[in-house]
Image (spheres, rainbow, N blue to C red):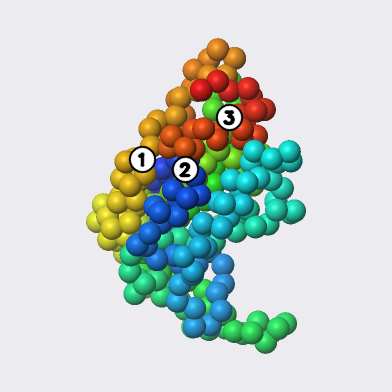
């Protein structure tokens, strides 16, 4: 790809799998961070639903999710777009070991990323959400949307930038990221809870149905949260 992200917009939320499925309606799901088979165009509608459904069942369970054991919970290689013509793939290449042909993403502009986030208490008494969920899978507390604040496009020799475009001028941001965050806001409210008598407002939106389930999550049980 001929662009590089500068900074990130992040939107954190917690909804049920059923709500998530409805929120995804109308958008294309495309793989952007790993190779795809030659001729690939887009992923099935359930691609971004399946790992969240698996996590939703695992987070309140007797054992926390494990990166090696529960791989179905951590298959987050797809993003969202409104226009497949903006999500091209480079020329096919052959895997010498298997003989199979693959392609890599060469998108004209960023798609909207989706992945879980972990809610991590620090020794300073604050809560942090920027640790990678793979470091603290038991502390996963929801999903986040990601989109660059700016996209810096390389010049022809790739030794500098030809132009830097704010996200507000990128169509996928305006047609996917913003509408999707508005959909989420329409069914959620800010999450507030307390730990040991201290109140936290971590900047997470939560739906009423997800709020009922949240006390059973590993994070909530481990830190004895009070809603």
* Residue assigned mark 2: 15
Q: Whole-Å distance between the Cαs marked 3 and 2?
A: 14 Å
Question: Which tag, 3 or 2, sits closer to the chain's start?
Answer: 2
In the picture, measured across the screen, residue 97 lies left or right of residue 92, that is right
In the picture, measured across the screen, residue 169 lies left or right of residue 187, that is left
Q: Which mark is residue 32?
A: none
Q: Secondary structure at mark 2?
A: loop
In the picture, measured across the screen, residue 96 lies left or right of residue 167, that is right
* Residue assigned mark 1: 187
Percent coordinates x, y for residue 121 in the rendering: 60, 27
Q: Are marks 3 and 1 in contact (CB under 8 Å)?
A: no
The residue at the point 65 percent across, 82 percent down is 95
From what the image shows, is residue 125 above or below residue 110? above
For label 2, count other residues whose C-alpha is less than 10 Å away and answer few (under 14), some (14-19) or many (20+).
many
Q: Whole-Å distance between the Cαs marked 1 and 2?
A: 9 Å
Q: Quadrant of residue 122?
A: top right
Question: Which tag, 1 or 2, sits closer to the chain's start?
Answer: 2
Q: Nearer the viewer, residue 114 or 167?
A: 114
Percent coordinates x, y for residue 71 in the rendering: 68, 57
Q: Whole-Å distance between the Cαs marked 3 and 1?
A: 19 Å
Percent coordinates x, y for residue 58 in the rendering: 66, 45
Q: Nearer the viewer, residue 193 or 168?
A: 193
């Amino acid at each position: 790809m001929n662009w590089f992200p500068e900074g990130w917009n992040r939107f954190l939320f917690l909804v049920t799998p059923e709500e998530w499925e409805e929120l995804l309606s109308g958008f294309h799901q495309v793989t952007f961070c790993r190779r795809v088979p030659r001729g690939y165009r887009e992923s099935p509608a359930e691609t971004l639903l399946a790992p969240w459904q698996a996590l939703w069942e695992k987070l309140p369970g007797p054992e926390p999710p494990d990166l090696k054991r529960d791989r179905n919970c951590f298959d987050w290689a797809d993003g969202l777009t409104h226009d497949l013509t903006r999500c091209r793939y480079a020329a096919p290449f052959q895997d010498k070991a298997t003989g199979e042909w693959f392609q890599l993403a060469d998108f004209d502009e960023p798609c909207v990323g989706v992945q879980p986030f972990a809610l991590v208490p620090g020794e300073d008494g604050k809560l942090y959400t920027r640790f990678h969920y793979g470091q603290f899978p038991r502390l996963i507390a929801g999903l986040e949307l990601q989109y660059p604040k700016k996209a810096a496009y390389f010049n022809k020799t790739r030794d500098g930038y030809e132009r830097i475009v704010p996200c507000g001028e990128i169509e996928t941001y305006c047609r996917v990221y913003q509408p999707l965050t508005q959909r989420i806001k329409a069914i959620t409210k800010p999450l507030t809870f307390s730990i040991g008598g201290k109140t936290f407002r971590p900047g997470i939106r939560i739906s009423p149905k997800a709020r009922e389930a949240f006390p059973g999550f590993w994070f909530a049980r481990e830190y004895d949260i009070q809603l």
